[in-house]
């Protein structure tokens, strides 16, 4: 029997057609299942009107049994099978209460037959059987990494094992066309397409182009429910009758403004996915109907969480989180494997993170995935976790400076204290806290969601403060980098005050060089991409933005300039051109430094630096004092 990779499933005139790639022959194969009929569900028993409507459209019915997601009870339903796959959704919408008519028939076939796109199968005649399992050489390490999960949460471990056995399979070497992919694709993108297909139950052509994470999560959830014979709820059932509304978000603890040394930032790893996993948050577990669960309250809300059963969404998201944290992240840093293997592992970790990051957002607003009670419970546990971590840190004698959603800034903590806090959070909150960043200097302004830090390697880390723009000239970038470098080795106030003086001197020297014309024009050059036709702009506009002033002059000098190109220019003293006032010239047309608008560059340099350094008490907006030493 040949081993082939399932790439797609298509609707046929009768049944469905499975599309597979056979690497041994470098050929596409097809397996036709003429017996399969697309379907949807209606209540049982049918009303006479419903039965007549089904018969009029040539549908066939049978009574079937499904489990209810919320009650776990068995439900008798009428399964309505139709011949035309394209008509399922349209026909199901004729009825006020119907289920699963929105599931595309090819995906429904894969869900029903427990097929995974991108996976290898043994194909012989019309039979297709799985040809994947965890590779023998990886089995011991897999068991070691996930032993704790297996003992604590066997259901989640079962899903992790399934996903790992799929994700550890090789990717076939084939032309994109034979895999159903239009155009060219890089090796890394092909790897990601197969990973996504295997994890999210999506055909390879879809996985290679889809950018809607909600589509991925919906397919994962539907496949999981079908495997367990659970009826996929309608959108309003999933919402429990609630309308989608704004959900209170994460917590921000006001910063203790000032300048700090040796600041350690700890954060919860994958906070919202971790909460979904740790606190069993799922569509059917939040506000379950069991009286004995009513006291298991979600902090700060009226919601409660089920204690009797594991939630499907919690298992799904928890499995992906553990697979990322326990396997792909460590693998991406493993020196014993090749660089290309590490790069692919890093790509897989990024893909899983993308799904995990969206796992909360889809519960807020995406039709078919939204449930306000679930979304509110996730963020409520997030706020609770940050407050509890702050309390623990304070009781340990640590000095928390600022907290934002999933991060805590600690002032000059010892290594032992940080490690103890991490263990305490793990034991009491069941969440992973880890050191995210270390700043030799950290500046916290009064405003929330804004800070500036210098890492020990001299790298600046800026949030919520306007620092350098992408098109800032080299003058600004070089001065900024030199100023930040002066803060790299600062460890106390005395060193900080000396660094401030050195920073002032750097800026003063830069301004003096600028005024004396000692800088190359290239250091003053702006580079901006054109988004509009420069020919039309130059003719029609009464006033021109600086990039188009540059473009017009280049065109007049005989050069061709197109939309999407970058133009390079220098700010000059205002001059008249084509009846308009121009303030820039293309760098190649500037005749000398005497044309440069020095005052404008000084103003822009000071403005850019003040955004970052003013909160440190280093402001450049006043004329700088100059003493005799500056001239020596």
Image (cartoon, grey):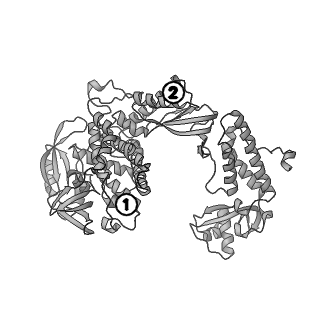
Q: Position of residue 437 (x, y in %)?
A: 54, 40
Disc 1: CA contacts within 10 A as few (<14), some (14-19) or many (>=20): many
* Residue that lies at the very extreme toward the front in this rendered image: 336
Asked whether residue 545 appears in the rendered view, the answer is no
Identify the image quadrant of residue 592.
Answer: bottom right
Residue receiving disc 2: 393
Foreground residue among 39 and 340: 340
Whether 41 is drawn above or below 58: the answer is above
Q: Position of residue 533 (x, y in %)?
A: 58, 68
Horizontal side of 475 relative to 169 (left or right) equals right
Identify the image quadrant of residue 196.
Answer: bottom left
Identify the image quadrant of residue 569.
Answer: bottom right
Task: Tally the numbered discs.
Answer: 2
Q: Position of residue 470 (x, y in %)?
A: 61, 55
Horizontal side of 479 relative to 78 (left or right) equals right
Lower sequence index among marks 1 and 2? 1
Q: Secondary structure at mark 2?
A: helix
Q: Secondary structure at mark 1?
A: helix
Whether 438 is drawn above or below 121: the answer is above
Q: Which numbered disc covers residue 286? A: none
Foreground residue among 628 and 600: 628
Horizontal side of 454 relative to 226 (left or right) equals right
Disc 2: CA contacts within 10 A as few (<14), some (14-19) or many (>=20): many
Q: Position of residue 419 (x, y in %)?
A: 48, 31
Asked whether residue 265 appears in the rendered view, the answer is yes
Foreground residue among 5 and 622: 5
Say which residue appears at 46% left-offset and 27% top-offset: 388
Q: CA distance from mark 1 to mark 2?
A: 45 Å
Residue receiving disc 1: 190
Is the N terminus in the top left, top right, bottom left or bottom right quadrant?
bottom left
């Amino acid at each position: 029997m040949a081993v082939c990779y399932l790439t797609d499933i298509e609707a046929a005139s009768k049944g469905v057609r499975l599309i597979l790639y056979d690497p041994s022959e470098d050929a596409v194969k097809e397996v036709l299942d003429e017996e399969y009929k697309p379907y949807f569900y209606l209540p049982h028993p049918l009303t006479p009107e419903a039965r007549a409507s089904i018969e009029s459209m040539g549908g066939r019915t049978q009574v079937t049994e499904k489990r209810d997601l919320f009650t776990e009870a068995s439900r008798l339903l009428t399964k309505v099978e139709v011949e035309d796959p394209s008509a399922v959704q349209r026909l199901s919408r004729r009825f006020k209460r119907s289920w699963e008519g929105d599931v595309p028939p090819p995906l429904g076939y894969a869900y029903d037959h427990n097929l995974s796109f991108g996976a290898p199968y043994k194909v012989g005649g019309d039979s297709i059987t799985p040809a994947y399992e965890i590779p023998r050489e990886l089995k011991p390490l897999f068991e070691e990494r996930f032993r704790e999960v297996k003992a604590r949460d066997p259901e989640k471990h079962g899903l992790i094992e399934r996903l790992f056995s799929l994700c550890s399979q090789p990717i076939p070497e084939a032309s994109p066309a034979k895999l159903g992919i239009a155009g060219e694709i890089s090796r890394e993108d092909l790897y990601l397409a197969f990973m996504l297909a295997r994890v999210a139950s999506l055909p390879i052509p879809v996985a290679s182009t889809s950018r809607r994470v909600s589509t991925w999560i919906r397919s994962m959830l539907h496949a999981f429910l079908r495997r367990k014979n659970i009826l996929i709820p309608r959108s309003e059932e999933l919402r429990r009758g609630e309308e989608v509304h704004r959900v209170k978000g994460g917590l921000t603890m006001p910063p203790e403004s000032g300048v700090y040394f040796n600041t350690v930032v700890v954060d919860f790893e994958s906070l919202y996915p971790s909460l979904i996993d740790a606190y069993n948050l799922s569509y059917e577990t939040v506000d379950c109907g069991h009286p004995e669960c009513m006291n298991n309250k979600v902090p700060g809300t009226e919601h409660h969480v089920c204690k009797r059963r594991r939630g499907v969404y919690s298992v799904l998201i928890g499995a992906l989180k553990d697979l990322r944290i326990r396997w792909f992240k460590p693998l991406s840093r493993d020196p014993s494997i090749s660089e290309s293997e590490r790069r692919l592992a890093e790509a897989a970790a990024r893909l899983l993170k993308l799904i995990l990051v969206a796992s909360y957002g889809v519960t807020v607003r995406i039709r078919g995935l939204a449930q306000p009670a679930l979304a509110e419970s996730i963020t409520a546990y997030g706020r609770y976790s940050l407050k509890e971590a702050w309390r623990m840190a304070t009781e340990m004698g640590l000095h928390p400076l600022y907290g934002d959603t999933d991060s805590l800034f600690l002032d000059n903590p010892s290594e032992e204290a940080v490690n103890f806090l991490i263990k305490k959070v793990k034991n009491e909150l069941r969440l992973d806290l880890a050191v995210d960043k270390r700043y030799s200097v950290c500046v916290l302004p009064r405003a929330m969601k804004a800070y500036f830090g210098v890492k020990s390697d001299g790298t600046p880390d800026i949030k919520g403060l306007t620092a350098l723009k992408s098109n800032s000239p080299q003058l600004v970038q070089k001065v900024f980098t030199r100023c930040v470098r002066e803060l790299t080795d600062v460890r106390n106030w005395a060193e900080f005050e000396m660094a401030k003086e050195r920073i002032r001197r750097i800026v003063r020297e830069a301004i003096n060089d600028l005024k004396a014309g000692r800088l190359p024009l290239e250091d003053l050059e702006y580079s901006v991409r054109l988004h509009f036709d420069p020919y039309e702009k130059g003719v029609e506009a009464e006033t021109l933005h600086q990039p188009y002033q540059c473009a017009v002059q280049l065109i007049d000098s005989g050069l061709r300039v197109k939309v999407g190109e970058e133009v390079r220019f220098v700010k000059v003293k205002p001059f008249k051109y084509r009846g308009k006032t121009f303030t820039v010239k293309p760098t190649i047309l500037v005749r000398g430094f005497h044309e440069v608008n020095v005052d404008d560059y000084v103003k822009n340099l000071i403005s850019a630096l003040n955004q970052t350094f003013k909160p440190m008490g280093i402001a450049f907006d006043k004329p700088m004092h100059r003493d005799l030493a500056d001239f020596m």
